[in-house]
Amino acid sequence: MLAVEYPPFTTSQVASNGIAFELLEKAALSDSVEWRAVYAPPGRAAEMIKAGEWCASFYPVEEDIESRSITLSQSEVSIGLVRQTQSTPFKWNDLSELKNKSVALLRTREGSTFAQQFSDAGLDVVFIENIETGLKLVKRSRVDFTLSDNIFYVQQNDRDLQFSKTTILTTPITLFINPECSVMDEFDVD
């Protein structure tokens, strides 16, 4: 199971490997597959997926790569931006309204459509290896924004940081399956 350090969802720092792995165990998808976490930095995870060197992943798979998915959570996670706290609500209608600012994103494969949307909107993208680094960069004024999710943000309980009211995307916790991996043949999902 390919994963990146993204607490509390996937992390080698706890015995259960995080919320996503706990949901996977509860789903009891297969008695014949033993799920084992393989952590990689985000850029390497993206390259492994691109090269077909994976069977299952919690790291998101780009749309142009064939995969199947299994939704593991009933509730969704909101992905947004975090900035230093200001007195006004943090929202925008179009990313281009944030032009000439900097944003920290988890490293991904070159040409990622997700990362490209920020560059196309005129933001300077700084790649990072984990969400904690992004929050530190915002607090130290090294970047204007960092990508985060609402659950991780709430757990930080940091009044110096403000989560955006506008979301980049909303998604359930999803398991991605490589249909080319013979170990995953028994998973007939769409």
Image: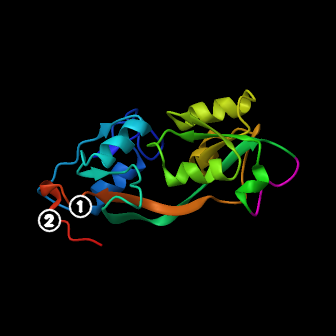
- Report if residue 123 lies within the magenta region: no
> How many C-alpha atoms fall within 10 Å of the one at disc 2: few (<14), some, or many (≥20)?
few
The three-letter amino acid code for the residue at tag 1 is: Ala
- The image shows residue 52 at horizontal and vertical percentages of 25, 49
Q: Are marks 2 and 1 in contact (CB under 8 Å)?
A: no
Which quadrant of the figure has residue 39? top left
Out of 103 and 186, give the one closest to the viewer.
103
Q: Earlier in the sequence, mark 2 or mark 1?
A: 1
At horizontal 14% and vertical 63% (from top left) the residue drawn is 185
The reply to whether residue 17 is visible in this rendering is no
Residue that label 2 marks: 186
- Kindly state the secondary structure of the residue where label 2 is placed: loop
Tally of marks: 2
Queried whether the magenta region covers residue 88, the answer comes back as: yes
**Residue 36 image-quadrant placement:** top left
Q: Which residue is mark 1?
A: 28
Measuring from the top left, give residue 87's x and y in whole percent.
Answer: 88, 48
Amino acid on which the number 2 mark rests in the picture: Glu
- Which residue is found at the position 33% from the left and 58% from the top? 176
Distance (Cα) linking label 2 and label 1: 13 Å
Q: Residue at x 27, y 52 (%)?
A: 56
From the viewer's side, name the closer residue of 95 and 7: 95
Percent x, y for residue 53? Answer: 24, 45
Q: Main secondary structure of the magenta part?
A: loop
Residue 126 vs 183, above or below: the answer is: above
In the image, 13 versus 181, the foreground residue is: 181
Q: Of discs 2 and 1, which sits in the foreground?
A: 2
> Quick check: 51 above or below 97?
above
Magenta extent? 87-93
> Residue drawn 77% across and 57% down?
91
- Quadrant containing the C terminus in the rendered view: bottom left
